[in-house]
Amino acid sequence: MGFFKKLANALKKTKEAFSRKIDALLSHGELDDDFYDDLTDLLISCDLGVRPAMEVVDELRLYARKNKIRSANEVKDALKLILTEQLESSPKIEFEFPVVITIIGVNGVGKTTTIGKLAKYFSDQKKSVTLVAGDTFRAAASEQLTMWAERSKTRIIKHAEGADAAAVVFDGIASAKAKKTDVLIVDTAGRLHTKTNLMEELKKINKVTAREYPEAQKLTFIVLDATTGQNAVNQISAFNEYVQIDGIVLTKLDGTAKGGVVVAIERDLKKPVVFVGTGEGIDDIELFDAKTFINEMF
């Protein structure tokens, strides 16, 4: 199945909720204050967030007035244009190899599954991949990651449960350098920002990576569950106090009608969505494309 089809399926719930409602608004014909108020409420209901929704509607109002927009299709096209520009305003990630990608996030967002998908994605791009089982906190975490390594046909470096996560990363880097690996993907324990010891562990992992692999590109991606809506935005803010987040992997997009959270993330936090999960299979992850995403929302 191609990317466009996968993304269309993943955004089906969002499209059904959003497109149907905006069509109903536009059927009234008049672009008056009531229309713009209702559109703001609709955007908020799709998890754009209050401030982003109000700003987008203000931009649409000005655009419609300036360009003498009247028809429903013109309004839709203008809204698509504005939302796409919002999503394209964040700095984009350009991968350089070798690269170390550290994956962080709270428990239950699909972090380990995402690592397996990323391993397969980069392998399909003809890049050599090694996984590092840096989650030594959760029982059976390394076994779960080993299963994904086997499925994606990639190498894995792991220690015993309870080992020092930074030590596992140290060994992973040594192995990657020896094997001239293109992509090193580091799993970390799921954590809340209130778990100070685990947050400090992230700092230690980053310090080891910077010291031991200065020549590699270093990226930290936070995995977010799209179904949590605005809570996803709060998670980024909390984690960003401890580590520099470079990008976002959005999972479970197919399980929510609130895909608009992507706009809130990029507009409020200036953090790019790099990958989106488009299903449950190992191949169901794709590089994020703003224009395609917005087109599939309508």
Image (cartoon, grey):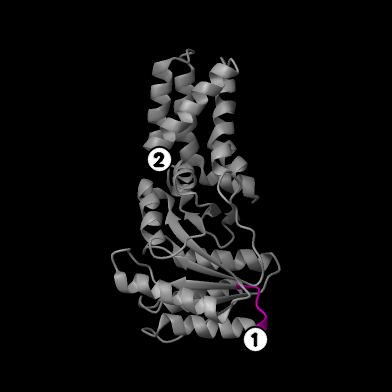
Q: Secondary structure at mark 1?
A: helix
Q: Secondary structure at mark 2?
A: loop
Q: Which residues are magenta?
A: 178-183
Residue 53, picture quadrant: top left
Instruction: Tell me the tag on residue 101.
Output: none
| Residue matched to label 1 | 178
Residue 93, picture quadrant: bottom right
Q: Residue 152 location in percent, x, y?
A: 59, 71
Q: Residue shown at 61%/42% (left/top)?
A: 292
Looking at the image, can residue 158 be seen? Answer: no
| Residue matched to label 2 | 47
Tag 1: amino acid: Ala
Disc 1/disc 2 C-alpha distance (Å): 46 Å
295 to the left or right of 147: right
Residue 72, picture quadrant: top right
Closer-to-camera residue (20/287): 287
Q: How many marks?
A: 2
